């Protein structure tokens, strides 16, 4: 395929501005999918994506488009996720493209992730085509939106397209702009092979499916290939493109995006960002720079409910991490929970998604511990240690400096909510930076905030303060010393390691009280009284007591009709699955997450 007739582009936007719908519409217009498939949001095919109505994984599709000049073009489209947790996924996609369609909702206008994604595209020098979407909405603010595009993003408003992805209005303009504005890829088909691995997926029957963008040269079935970083060679048994389902093709050459299968079932040979070449050309090429490894921001423990499932969980985590290279896992043990893994994620949504994928796609039942951000401790002896687990915090006496990650946060909010946002940020130890007024009575506020104060519930707080109109985006900037301490939780006078958290000294009392109260609600009554205590060092700072169960309460369960009783038993069994016995006390899964809602 002559690279001159190839165009590679990503679709980027804030969440819900219509990326997946536009992608589907482009598929529909080029005949890649049917009308019925269009109404089904064909690209969001993971269970979690359908359930939540969001895109989690970037998707690649090759389209054939006949341009007005009569020439056939191959358009490789990448649909991307919008949520802040998935910036890494977006950045990887952008690196495989020459252009980007930047969608902006005709009513909502420029939002926090519009800004973040636009800047990411500008940074890698992509040609940006601005597309105002949803012009069919009964109320739009198109002129305001165009002004925002100019003032906040610095893009030319006169070149912006106006479309409805849902109704299919002005989609031809989109195709025209892609062909005419996005530059063709620069590689040459007869150069030595250089291909970038940008994603991968495990298939139990065919082995690993490796997603590649060919930068130089040509790849075909039967070719021996070398994975440079892994210094490993294999033979290609299939090359193909996504249309949108994987379809074998003869060759993939410079500028094209597709997949290769080598039948490989060993996951550790595949490294996202690695370069593939022909073994005999390995000396001739320079490996591609690949990707900067994403930094996991949020960590939690994941333990199999049944300890027999430990090995299975390890295998499933390995498989999932191949398809999602942005999460990490390492074995750990807990007195309370046994053998499990400490897993790292890009954010809370990412954590929820991984957990859900493990349970849904892989059928593993888990106990998950409360998430924490990653800290750093400078010891008195000069060593600096990274802390991903509150259990690893050393003795207070040996700590010189306890450091936490600080993020730069951008809020875009209606003007009337500026005061409340400032108050929220002040409560969260925020440091104010700037305010900038933008079109349509809105403002952009910039703050530096401790990551730990953002990840758990800042987004929900923002939404409730602004009645849903505010948006935010953040990026971790640096580590800074803070007055942090480890807070232990004792249940029935025994320390439960998996309930320990790291808190700021000024909020420790409040959090300790909140957590004890919450645990009291989550742990059910037993035959005996259970004290619950929060402690720092040896000092108890909060306490609650779960009173003992009275005999006649259980008596109620007996008698009554048999189906009701069976239902009750079934329910208890269901509940059991998510319990861990700790000493004489049963602690349910929900209790481990109490810290999230304990204020
Ligand atoms: P994404 O998060 O950017 O991928 O957004 P989706 O494509 O999932 O769309 C979010 C919502 O906006 C869905 O309910 C779509 O049906 C709706 N939507 C997308 N494009 C349009 C449009 O052109 N007009 C209208 N009225 N709704 C749209
Ligand atoms: Mg989407």
Image (cartoon, grey):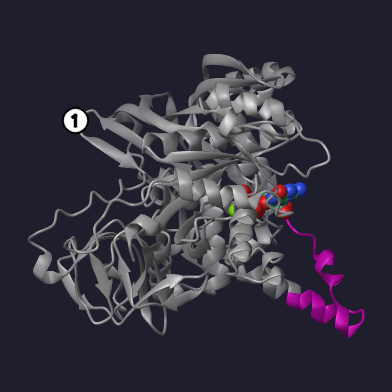
Kindly tell me whether residue 433 is visible in this rendering.
yes
Residue labelled 1 has its Cβ within 8 Å of some atom of ligand 1: no
Whole-percent x, y for residue 352 in the image: 56, 55
User: Magenta span has 566?
Assistant: yes
Asked if residue 339 is positioned above or below residue 488 in the image, the reply reads below
Of 292 and 560, nearer the camera is 292
The part of the image, by quadrant, that contains residue 377 is: top left
Could you tell whether 418 is left or right of 160 in the image? right
Extent of the magenta region: 546-570
At 62% from the left and 37% from the top, the residue drawn is 459
At 66% from the left and 29% from the top, the residue drawn is 145
Whole-percent x, y for residue 101 in the image: 53, 45
The local crowd at label 1, few if under 14, some if 14 to 19, many if 20 or more residues have their Cα within 10 Å, is: few
Q: Residue furthest left?
A: 283
At 66% from the left and 56% from the top, the residue drawn is 53
The residue identified by callout 1 is 381
Could you tell whether 338 is left or right of 358 in the image? left
User: Magenta span has 421?
Assistant: no
């Amino acid at each position: 395929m002559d690279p001159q007739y190839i165009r590679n582009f990503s679709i980027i936007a804030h969440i819900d501005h219509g990326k997946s719908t536009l992608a589907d519409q482009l598929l529909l217009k080029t005949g890649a999918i049917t009308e019925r498939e269009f109404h089904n949001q064909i690209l969001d095919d993971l269970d979690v994506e359908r359930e939540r109505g969001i895109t989690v994984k970037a998707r690649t599709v090759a389209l054939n488009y006949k341009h007005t000049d009569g020439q056939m073009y191959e358009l490789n489209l990448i649909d991307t996720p919008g949520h802040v947790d998935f910036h890494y996924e977006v950045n990887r996609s952008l690196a495989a493209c020459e252009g980007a369609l930047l969608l902006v909702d005709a009513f909502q206008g420029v939002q926090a992730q519009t800004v973040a994604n636009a800047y990411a595209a500008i940074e890698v020098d992509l040609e940006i085509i601005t597309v105002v979407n949803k012009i069919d909405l009964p109320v739009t603010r198109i002129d305001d939106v165009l002004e925002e595009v100019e003032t906040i993003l610095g893009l030319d408003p006169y070149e912006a397209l106006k479309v409805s992805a849902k109704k299919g209005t002005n989609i031809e303009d989109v195709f025209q702009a892609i062909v005419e504005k996005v530059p063709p890829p620069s590689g040459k088909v007869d150069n030595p092979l250089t291909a970038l691995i940008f994603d991968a997926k495990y298939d139990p029957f065919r082995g690993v499916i490796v997603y590649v963008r060919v930068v130089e040269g040509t790849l075909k079935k039967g070719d021996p290939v070398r994975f440079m970083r892994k210094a490993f060679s294999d033979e290609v048994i299939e090359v193909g493109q996504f249309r949108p389902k994987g379809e074998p093709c003869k060759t993939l050459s410079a500028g094209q995006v597709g997949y290769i299968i080598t039948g490989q079932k060993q996951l550790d040979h595949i490294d996202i960002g690695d370069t593939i070449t022909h073994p005999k050309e390995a000396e001739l090429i320079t490996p591609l720079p690949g990707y900067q490894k994403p930094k996991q921001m949020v960590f939690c423990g994941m333990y199999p409910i049944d300890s027999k499932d430990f090995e299975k969980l390890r295998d499933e985590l390995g498989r999932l991490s191949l398809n999602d290279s942005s999460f990490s896992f390492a074995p750990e043990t807990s007195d309370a929970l046994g053998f499990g893994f400490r897993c790292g994620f890009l954010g809370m949504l990412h954590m929820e998604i991984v957990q859900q994928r493990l349970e849904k796609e892989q059928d593993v039942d888990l106990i998950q511990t409360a998430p924490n951000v990653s800290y750093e401790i400078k010891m008195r002896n000069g060593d600096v240690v990274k802390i991903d687990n509150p259990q690893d915090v050393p003795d207070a006496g040996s700590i010189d400096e306890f450091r936490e990650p600080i993020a730069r946060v951008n809020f875009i909010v209606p003007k009337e909510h500026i005061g409340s946002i400032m108050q929220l940020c002040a409560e969260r130890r925020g440091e104010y930076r700037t305010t900038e007024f933008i079109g349509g009575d809105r403002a952009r506020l910039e703050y530096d905030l401790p990551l730990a104060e953002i990840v758990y519930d800042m987004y929900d707080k923002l939404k409730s303060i602004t009645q849903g109109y505010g948006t935010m985006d953040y990026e971790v900037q640096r580590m800074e010393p803070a007055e942090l301490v480890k807070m232990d939780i004792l249940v029935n006078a025994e320390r439960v390691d998996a309930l320990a958290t790291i808190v700021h000294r000024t909020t420790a009392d409040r959090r300790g009280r909140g957590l004890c109260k919450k645990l009291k609600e989550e742990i059910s009554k037993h035959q005996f009284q259970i004290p619950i205590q929060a402690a720092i060092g040896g000092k108890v700072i909060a306490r609650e007591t779960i009173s003992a169960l009275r005999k006649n309460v259980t008596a109620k369960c007996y008698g009554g009709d048999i189906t009701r009783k069976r239902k009750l038993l079934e329910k208890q069994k269901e509940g059991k699955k998510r319990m861990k016995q700790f000493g004489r006390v049963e602690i349910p899964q929900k209790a481990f997450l109490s810290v999230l809602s304990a204020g």
